[in-house]
C-alpha cells in the first residue's frame, strides 16, 4: 500500500496572526486618537505651549489675552528696549515704545503658529507640550519712527550714487565726476529694526535683563556706481550761438547780445573716462564774442548823417500842404539792414480822406488840378538825399518834364499802384529818415536827412551831365472865347525845355580817395511848347504880319454915308496906333516863357551841390507815370533807370 506524505504546519502560526490583528487595531485606535487630537487642536482657542512673542510667554493664552499681555509689557518697558541700526560710522536707534505695534496681529500669528496643516498640527502641539519652544516675531507698523530714521540716514549719508556735475567757469567747462553711492530701502531698515527689537524684548522681557537693553543690526546697502552723463545733452545746455545786439524796429529797444559758446564733445568724454571718482577736471571752451553788444550798438545807432537833400517848395498853398503831409508820412521811418523803403507803401494812396488837397498835376501831359498834386517833390527830395549816400537804389523813374526843384537826373516820380521809388538799407545797421518842412526867407523848404552808422567814413557825391537841350517851341490853339485881335498865353500849361541828363554817384573813403563810380542811369525829359490861344476869326497866326493879330474894323455911326471918311483905314482903324499888339501882347517880350520859367536855365545845378532854385510852380507837378500821350508809351517818354507800364488815367496822381 502506497503511503501519502502530509506537510507539517509550523507551531505558533495562529499567534502571529493574532498579533498582527491586534497591532492593526491598536494603530487604528491611535490614528483615530491622533485625528481627534488634531481636530481638538484646530478648534482650541489657546496658543500652543512654549510659545514666546517679543520675550513674553503667551502659552495657553487666547488671542485677546496674548494681545493684552504684550501691550502691557511694552507699555511698561518700551523705552528700555531699543534697536540700533548702523552703516559705517552712521548709527540710529528706535525704542519699542516708539513703534506702532499691532499686538492683535502678533497674538493672532502666535495662535496660528503650528496650525497651518491639519494633520501636522497635532504632532506640533505634542512637541510643544513636551518642551519644544517656538518664538513668533512681533508684528509692527512704523508710521513715523522708522520713517524718520530712514530720512535721517539719507540726509546724513546721501542718496544713491553721486551724479557728475559741471559748470562754466570763464573759458573752461569744469566737471566733477560722480561717486559710487549706496541705497538702503525703507523696508530693509524696517526689517532690521523689528528684528533688533525682537532680540531686545526677548532679553528684557524673556530673560529679565536689567536696565536699558539695546540690540544692534548692521545694514547692508546696495552699491550703485555713478551713471555716465549724457554728453550731448550737456553740449545742448552749454552751447550758445553768437548773436549781436539788435534793435526792435517797432519799439526801438536794443536786445542783449549773446556770447557764442562751444566745446569738443569727444574731448569731454575722454577726460571723463580718465578721471577718478569724485575728481574735478576741465576742458577749454570756444568763446566767440559778438561784434555788437547792447552798449556798443546803443552808442552807434543813428549817430551819423549818411546824406541829406533840400528842395524849395513853390506853387499853391494846397501843393505846399500836400508836400508837407507826404513828408510827415515818411518822417521817422526806420529801415533794418536789408529792408527796402517803398514810398508808395509808406504814404499809401494819396486820397482826400487822408487829408490831401487838389493841386496841379499832369494827366496825359497836361496840367490839371488833382488830389495829391505835388507829392512827387517829397519822393524826389528823398531820392536826392539817397544819392548822397551809398545806399542801394531799387526802383526809380524820372519825370516826364524836368522838375526844377532838384538837379536834372536826380528826381523820382511815383504813381500809386504802378510806379514807385524804392531803396534798400544796404548797411549793417538800422537807418532812419528825418523830414522837415519849414519856411525861411519867405520860401518854403523841404529837407530830408538819412541817419545811420558810418564806421568807415564813406561818403557819396552825385553829379550829372546834361545834353540834347531842346528849347520850347510855340504852339497856337484856336479858341473862340479869346477876344479878336488878341493873343493869350496859357499860363497853366507852362513851357519846358527838353533835355537829357546822365547821373553818376562817386563813392569816396574818409580820406577822399575815390572808391567807386556808380552809373545811376539816364533821364530823358520832354519839351513842352509855349501855348497861345487866339480867335479863329483872326486867321492863322503864322500869316500875321510881324506876328501881330489883325484888328477888327469899326465904323463911325455919325458918318455912315461918307465912305471916304468913315472907312479911312489910316485914321479910324490904324492898328498901329490904338491896338498895337506888339506892345501889349508881344509874346517875345512880356510873356516869353522860355526866359522866366525854363527850369533848365533858372535851376542849372551844374554839379550835385549846385543850389536848386524854386522854378515854375508847374515844373514839379509832373505826376509820375502819366497816361498815354498821343499813343506814346510812358516808358519811352520818361527814360530813366526803369519804366513802368502805362497805368492809364487815374485820379490818384502824383506831382
Image (cartoon, rainbow, N blue to C red):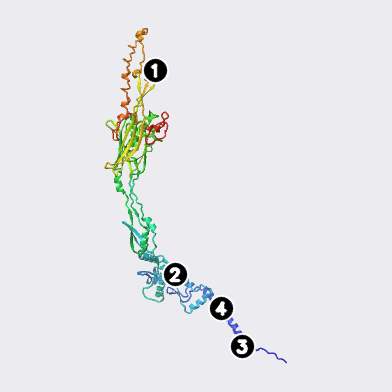
Query: Which labelled disc corresponds to residue 139?
Result: 2
Q: Which residue is at a point 32% across and 19% down the rendered structure image?
A: 582
Residue with the mark numbered 3: 12
**Mark 4 → mark 2, Cα distance in angstroms:** 37 Å
> How crowded is the residue under tag 3: few (<14 C-alpha within 10 Å), some, or many (20+)?
few
Which residue extends farthest front? 468
Dot 4 falls on a residue whose secondary structure is helix
Q: If you read the primary sequence from the N terminus, does the residue marked by circle 2 or circle 3 appear first?
A: 3
Alpha carbon distance from label 3 to label 4: 29 Å
Image disc number at residue 376: none
Q: Residue at point 35% right, 20% down?
A: 487
Q: Which callout, 1 or 2, points to the residue nearer the camera?
A: 1
Q: Is residue 436 visible?
A: no
Q: Quadrant of residue 624?
A: top left
Neighbor class of circle 4 (other Cα within 10 Å; few <14, some 14-19, many 20+) is: few
Label 3 to label 1, Cα distance in Å?
188 Å
Residue 48 in percent (x, y) is at 48, 75
Q: Of marks 1 and 4, which one's residue comes earlier in the chain?
A: 4
In percent of width and height, residue 307 lies at: 30, 39
Q: Which residue is mark 1?
A: 537
Observer-nearest residue: 335 or 365? 365
Which of labels 3 and 1 is toward the front?
1
Going from N to C along the chain, the mark reached first, 4 or 2, is: 4
Question: According to the image, label 4 marks what residue?
Answer: 31
The alpha-carbon separation of the residues under discs 2 and 3 comes to 63 Å
State the separation of the CA atoms marked 1 and 4.
Answer: 163 Å
Dot 1, how many residues are within 10 Å of its Cα: few (below 14), some (14-19), or many (20+)? some
Q: Are marks 3 and 1 in contact (CB under 8 Å)?
A: no
Amino acid at each position: 500500500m502506497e503511503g501519502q506524505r502530509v506537510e507539517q504546519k509550523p507551531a505558533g502560526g495562529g499567534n502571529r496572526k493574532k498579533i498582527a490583528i491586534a497591532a492593526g487595531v491598536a494603530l487604528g485606535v491611535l490614528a483615530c486618537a491622533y485625528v481627534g487630537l488634531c481636530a481638538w487642536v484646530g478648534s482650541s482657542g489657546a496658543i500652543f505651549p512654549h510659545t514666546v512673542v517679543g520675550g513674553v510667554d503667551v502659552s495657553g493664552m487666547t488671542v485677546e489675552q496674548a494681545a493684552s499681555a504684550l501691550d502691557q509689557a511694552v507699555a511698561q518697558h518700551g523705552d528700555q528696549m531699543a534697536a540700533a541700526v548702523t552703516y559705517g560710522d552712521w548709527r540710529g536707534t528706535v525704542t519699542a515704545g516708539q513703534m506702532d505695534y499691532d499686538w492683535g496681529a502678533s497674538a493672532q500669528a502666535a495662535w496660528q503658529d503650528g496650525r497651518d496643516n491639519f494633520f501636522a498640527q497635532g504632532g506640533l502641539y505634542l512637541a510643544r507640550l513636551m518642551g519644544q519652544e517656538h518664538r513668533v516675531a512681533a508684528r509692527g507698523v512704523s508710521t513715523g519712527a522708522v520713517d524718520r530714521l530712514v530720512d535721517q540716514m539719507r540726509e546724513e549719508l546721501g542718496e544713491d550714487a553721486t551724479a557728475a556735475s559741471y559748470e562754466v567757469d570763464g573759458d573752461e567747462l569744469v566737471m566733477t565726476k560722480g561717486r559710487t553711492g549706496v541705497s538702503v530701502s525703507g523696508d530693509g531698515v524696517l526689517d532690521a529694526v523689528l528684528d533688533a527689537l525682537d532680540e531686545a524684548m526677548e532679553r528684557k522681557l524673556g530673560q529679565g535683563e536689567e536696565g536699558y537693553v539695546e540690540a544692534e543690526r548692521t545694514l547692508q546697502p546696495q552699491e550703485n556706481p555713478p551713471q555716465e552723463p549724457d554728453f550731448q545733452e550737456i553740449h545742448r545746455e552749454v552751447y550758445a550761438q553768437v548773436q549781436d545786439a539788435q534793435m526792435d524796429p517797432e519799439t526801438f529797444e536794443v536786445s542783449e547780445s549773446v556770447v557764442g559758446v562751444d566745446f569738443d564733445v569727444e574731448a569731454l568724454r575722454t577726460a571723463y573716462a580718465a578721471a577718478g571718482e569724485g575728481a574735478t577736471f576741465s576742458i577749454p571752451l570756444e568763446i566767440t564774442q559778438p561784434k555788437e553788444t547792447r552798449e556798443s550798438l546803443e552808442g552807434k545807432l543813428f549817430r551819423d548823417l549818411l546824406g541829406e537833400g533840400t528842395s524849395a517848395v513853390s506853387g499853391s498853398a494846397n501843393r505846399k500842404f500836400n508836400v508837407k503831409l507826404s513828408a510827415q508820412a515818411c518822417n521817422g521811418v526806420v529801415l533794418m539792414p536789408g529792408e527796402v523803403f517803398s514810398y508808395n507803401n509808406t504814404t499809401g494812396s494819396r486820397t482826400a480822406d487822408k487829408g490831401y488837397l487838389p493841386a496841379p498835376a499832369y494827366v496825359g501831359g497836361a496840367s490839371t488840378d488833382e488830389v495829391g498834386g505835388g507829392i512827387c517833390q517829397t519822393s524826389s527830395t528823398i531820392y536826392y538825399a539817397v544819392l548822397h549816400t551809398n545806399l542801394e537804389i531799387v526802383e526809380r523813374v524820372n519825370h516826364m518834364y524836368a522838375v526844377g526843384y532838384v538837379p536834372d537826373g536826380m528826381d523820382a516820380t511815383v504813381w500809386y499802384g504802378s510806379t514807385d521809388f524804392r531803396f534798400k538799407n544796404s548797411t549793417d545797421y538800422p537807418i532812419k529818415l528825418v523830414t522837415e518842412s519849414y519856411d525861411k526867407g519867405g520860401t518854403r523848404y523841404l529837407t530830408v536827412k538819412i541817419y545811420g552808422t558810418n564806421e568807415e567814413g564813406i561818403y557819396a557825391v552825385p553829379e550829372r551831365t546834361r545834353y540834347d537841350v531842346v528849347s520850347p517851341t510855340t504852339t497856337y490853339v484856336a479858341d473862340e472865347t479869346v477876344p479878336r485881335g488878341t493873343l493869350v498865353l496859357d499860363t497853366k500849361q507852362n513851357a519846358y525845355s527838353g533835355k537829357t541828363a546822365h547821373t553818376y554817384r562817386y563813392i569816396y573813403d574818409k580820406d577822399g580817395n575815390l572808391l567807386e563810380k556808380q552809373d545811376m542811369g539816364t533821364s530823358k525829359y520832354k519839351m513842352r511848347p509855349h501855348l497861345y490861344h487866339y480867335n479863329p476869326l483872326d486867321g492863322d497866326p503864322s500869316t500875321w504880319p510881324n506876328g501881330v493879330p489883325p484888328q477888327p474894323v469899326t465904323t463911325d455911326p455919325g458918318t455912315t454915308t461918307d465912305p471916304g471918311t468913315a472907312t479911312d483905314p489910316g485914321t479910324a482903324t490904324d492898328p498901329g496906333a490904338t491896338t498895337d499888339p506888339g506892345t501889349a501882347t508881344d509874346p517875345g517880350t512880356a510873356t516869353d516863357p522860355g526866359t522866366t520859367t525854363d527850369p533848365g536855365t533858372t535851376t542849372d545845378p551844374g554839379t550835385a551841390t549846385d543850389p536848386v532854385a524854386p522854378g515854375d510852380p508847374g515844373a514839379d507837378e509832373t505826376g509820375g507815370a502819366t497816361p498815354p500821350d498821343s499813343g506814346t508809351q510812358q516808358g519811352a517818354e520818361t527814360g530813366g533807370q526803369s519804366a513802368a507800364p502805362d497805368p492809364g488815367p487815374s485820379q490818384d496822381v502824383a506831382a
